[in-house]
């Protein structure tokens, strides 16, 4: 059985290898005014993909304009229902909307959408092949429903979790993404062998970080919190472009 | 501080030479600082102070035609200047640039924002002109004496007032050139009736700073400017006129640098 592995491209965009298949999550390959990765985009060209997962329609997770340059727009997309019409509009022909706990199969890999909560409708995903399972958390808040994942979908081996606790200042400082402590709490619930933080380097730029958002850009806070709350899990802070095997 | 002349190829205008004075370390957070009709010297002290205090990189161009510099005939609008500075940022390959502009420089800043370059991450409009606000016209600069301009431009004009007739001939010629450049770029009204409507689509972090005693464009004009831009934050600067970076530079630096700690609801009155 080929090894399960993840290569973080940037932000929440990963290449996940599982069951001999390759999946892309939340594509983001360009920049716009006030939207910066804050770290490199570590890819020159994409490998052949067996599927793409998109959690919600925000530009930094759903850069369909850039991703439409991918060589095969019949690649299967598994998306939140709000993303489906946008994906079709960009010429993608094999688009499946998954609601929480609905699943689909691709070449022996089971893709199950899981709950989420964010500023807009969002789903997260579990990919399973045999005894390996990867949980991709997009940029959800920590919500009680996520505690059902192990019971309903079995053991999670690898968790990809947001950690910046993004707050939107003009919206009464509303929190829209889980923070490092909450990500550690979720790690303790999921009990994966490996957890990789994402969604922390993002910046809205000098002024945007002062006027629009505030966030924790230090992934070490997640590593520290996990050491206390989930000591059995190994936390790896992964630079874009580094492939990590389970 | 270094001054460099860049040749920038601007679409539909052609090559334009622009003189840019740079302050602070090259590795610092970048700011593009655009002067108004008062000319490039009206931002010099502020640029030096801001760069030294926070180790930021401040790039302060002289708009072609000001301070005795050449202006190509085809460069005759605020939109043209915006295209020039977008081209300059491309030439310098800068990202996460905050553009700061005072008066006509603020208008140019608004037009740069509308070009939606990913290189520009935010804008600061300081007593900007450019929009039309019913009941709050921009003072008619061209019909005023210089003495009246000083009176309207400063909370306390005394330290800034000069008698233009006492200036050496070269400075008088430059001042006349500045006046001609203002007329060319901004026209007599100093507004574009389409600007406010276009700003409604802007998705860029925006800080609007306004001198409470501005007699060129009053505080309600500033509030209307902030209202025209989604999510713009407005802050009134006390004991300050039309050129806050000249009159109260510390206040302007604090307003920008510490904007995360500002309770903007206090300024919405």
Image (tube, rainbow, N blue to C red):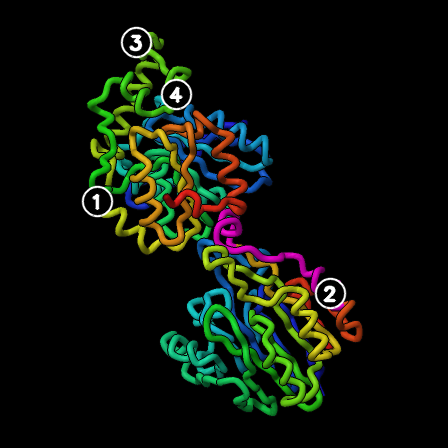
Q: Give me the C-alpha separation between circle 2 and circle 4.
A: 55 Å
Question: Both on one chain, marks 2 and 4?
Answer: no
Residue range of the region highlighted in magenta in the rendering: A204-226
Picture layout, residue A228 above or below residue A157: above
At x 48%, y 46%, the residue is: B263
Q: Nearer the viewer, mark 1 or mark 2?
A: 2
At x 27%, y 24%, the residue is: B179
Q: Chain of mark 2?
A: A
Q: Nearer the viewer, mark 4 or mark 3?
A: 4
Q: Chain of mark 3?
A: B
Secondary structure beneath label 2: helix
Of the image marks 4 and 1, the number of the one nearer the N terminus: 4
Q: Main secondary structure of the magenta part?
A: helix
> Where is mark 4, residue-wise?
B156
Question: Both on one chain, marks 1 and 3?
Answer: yes
At x 70%, y 86%, the residue is: A155
> Where is mark 2, residue-wise?
A225
Q: Nearer the viewer, residue A150 or A74?
A: A150
Work out whether residue B93 can be spotted: no
B86 relative to A7 in the view: left or right: left
Of the image marks 4 and 3, the number of the one nearer the N terminus: 4
> Where is mark 1, residue-wise?
B193
Of the image marks 1 and 3, the number of the one nearer the N terminus: 3
How many callouts does the rendering have? 4
Residue A225 is inside the magenta segment: yes
At x 40%, y 42%, the residue is: B208
> Where is mark 3, residue-wise?
B165
Q: Give me the C-alpha separation between circle 3 and circle 2.
A: 70 Å
């Amino acid at each position: 059985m080929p090894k399960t592995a993840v290569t973080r491209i940037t932000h929440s965009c990963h290449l996940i290898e599982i069951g001999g298949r390759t999946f892309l999550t939340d594509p983001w390959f360009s920049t716009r005014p006030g939207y910066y990765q804050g770290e490199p985009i570590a890819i020159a060209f994409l490998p052949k993909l067996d599927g793409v997962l998109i959690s919600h329609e925000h530009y930094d997770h759903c850069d369909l304009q850039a991703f439409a340059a991918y060589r095969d727009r019949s690649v299967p997309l598994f998306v939140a229902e709000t993303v489906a019409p946008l994906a079709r509009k960009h010429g993608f022909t094999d688009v499946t909307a998954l609601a929480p706990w609905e699943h689909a199969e691709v070449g022996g890999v089971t893709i199950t959408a899981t709950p989420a909560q964010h500023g807009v409708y969002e789903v997260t995903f579990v990919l399973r092949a045999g005894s390996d399972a990867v949980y991709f958390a997009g940029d959800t808040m920590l919500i009680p429903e996520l505690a059902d994942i192990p019971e309903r979908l079995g053991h999670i081996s690898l968790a990809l979790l947001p950690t910046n606790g993004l707050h939107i200042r003009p919206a009464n400082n509303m929190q829209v993404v889980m923070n490092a402590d909450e990500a550690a709490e979720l790690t303790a619930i999921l009990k994966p062998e490996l957890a990789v933080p994402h969604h922390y380097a993002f910046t809205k730029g000098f002024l945007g970080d002062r006027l629009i958002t505030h966030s924790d850009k230090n992934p070490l806070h997640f590593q520290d919190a996990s050491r206390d709350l989930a000591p059995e899990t190994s936390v790896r802070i992964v630079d874009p472009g580094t492939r990590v095997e389970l | 501080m270094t001054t460099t002349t860049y040749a920038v190829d601007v679409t539909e205008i052609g090559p334009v030479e622009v003189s840019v004075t740079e302050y602070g370390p090259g590795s610092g957070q970048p700011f593009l600082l655009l002067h108004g009709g008062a000319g490039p010297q009206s931002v010099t002290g502020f640029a030096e102070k801001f760069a030294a205090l926070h180790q930021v990189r401040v790039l302060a161009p002289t708009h072609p035609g000001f301070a005795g510099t050449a202006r190509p005939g085809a460069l005759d609008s605020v939109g043209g200047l915006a295209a020039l500075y977008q081209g300059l940022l491309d030439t310098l390959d800068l990202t996460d640039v905050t553009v700061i502009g005072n008066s006509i420089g603020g208008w140019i800043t608004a037009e740069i924002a509308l070009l939606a370059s990913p290189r520009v991450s935010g804008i600061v409009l300081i007593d900007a002109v450019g929009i039309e606000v019913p009941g709050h016209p921009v003072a008619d600069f061209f019909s005023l004496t210089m003495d009246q301009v000083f009176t309207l431009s400063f909370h306390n004009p005394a330290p800034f007032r000069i008698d233009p007739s006492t200036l050496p001939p070269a400075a008088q010629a430059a001042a006349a050139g500045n006046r001609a450049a203002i007329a060319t770029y901004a026209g007599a009204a100093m507004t574009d009736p389409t600007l406010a409507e276009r700003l409604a689509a802007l998705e860029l972090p925006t800080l609007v700073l306004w001198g409470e005693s501005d007699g060129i464009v009053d505080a309600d004009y500033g509030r209307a400017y902030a209202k025209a831009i989604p999510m713009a934050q407005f802050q009134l600067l006390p004991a300050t006129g039309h050129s806050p970076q000249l009159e109260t530079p510390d206040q302007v630096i604090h307003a920008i640098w510490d904007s995360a700690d500002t309770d903007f609801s206090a300024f919405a009155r």
